[in-house]
Image (spheres, helix red, strand yellow):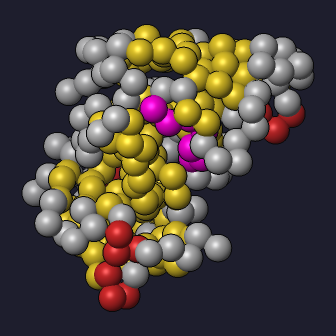
Amino acid sequence: EVQLVESGGGLVKPGGSLRLSCAASGFTFSSYSMNWVRQAPGKGLEWVSSISSSSSYIYYADSVKGRFTISRDNAKNSLYLQMNSLRAEDTAVYYCASESYYDSSGYHHYYMDVWGKGTTVTVSS
Amino acid sequence: DIQMTQSPSSLSASVGDRVTITCRASQSISSYLNWYQQKPGKAPKLLIYAASSLQSGVPSRFSGSGSGTDFTLTISSLQPEDFATYYCQQSYSTPEVTFGPGTKVDIK
């Protein structure tokens, strides 16, 4: 069964740090780009960060740039998100999601087709 | 940045109704548009990719259309399990994708 399982969430004070993990199983993890997407309480979805299959390409949303670091360990089938200098506005459910694409005449249409159940991060004093 | 809007923000419908949700991009994104369904407390689920391609395992009552800046998600006959929030997402600027604000579909 294709599965992503996040862990590492919790309650942290403003300015603190947290490291999220995402364990993959049932597919060839090393072949796929991976993403972190978050959802603040009662709000919509926000893309946070992306990492290519070999870690060659890494991207961040402006809202987390300089504070969050995405990484992966293909030998361990795991994705990580190191979150530093946390703020109240980082409070959210954090999902990891794998990325696939549809090839239409050489144009790649990317989408997130496998999602974990999420882990909750609460930043509060 | 490409901004996504959706309308309506919420709607009430009955089982068996035909439901249409609209998504608009702030600039042309060709057919780089995906649709997701999210139920309370659950992860999003991919329904439609590349504007009109149905994800494997998704019922055929779901369909997507559009190109450029205007897109629609249609549920041909609403079922009890379809009550959820629906999000569009542009993948034109992958990996820096953006989601619409969501449309909540609830029971009339």
Task: Let me know if residue B46 is in the magenta part.
Answer: yes
Front-most of residues B19 and A29: A29
Q: Quadrant of residue B79?
A: top right
Residue interval drawn in magenta: B44-50
Front-most of residues B39 and B20: B20
Instruction: Give residue A80's position: percent from left, percent from top.
Output: 32, 73
Front-most of residues A43 and B38: B38
Q: Is residue A36 left or right of residue B78?
A: left
Front-most of residues A122 and A43: A43
Against A45, residue B63 (above or below) is above
- Quadrant containing the N terminus of chain A is bottom right
Which residue appears at 64% of the width and 47% of the height? B56
Which residue appears at 59% of the width and 70% of the height? A2
Residue A29 visible: yes
Q: How many marks?
A: 0
Instruction: Give residue B50's position: percent from left, percent from top.
Output: 45, 32
Task: Let me know if residue A7 is in the magenta part.
Answer: no
Q: Is residue B45 left or right of residue A54?
A: right
Residue A82 visible: no
Against A123, residue B54 (above or below) is above
Which residue appears at 14% of the width and 66% of the height? A56
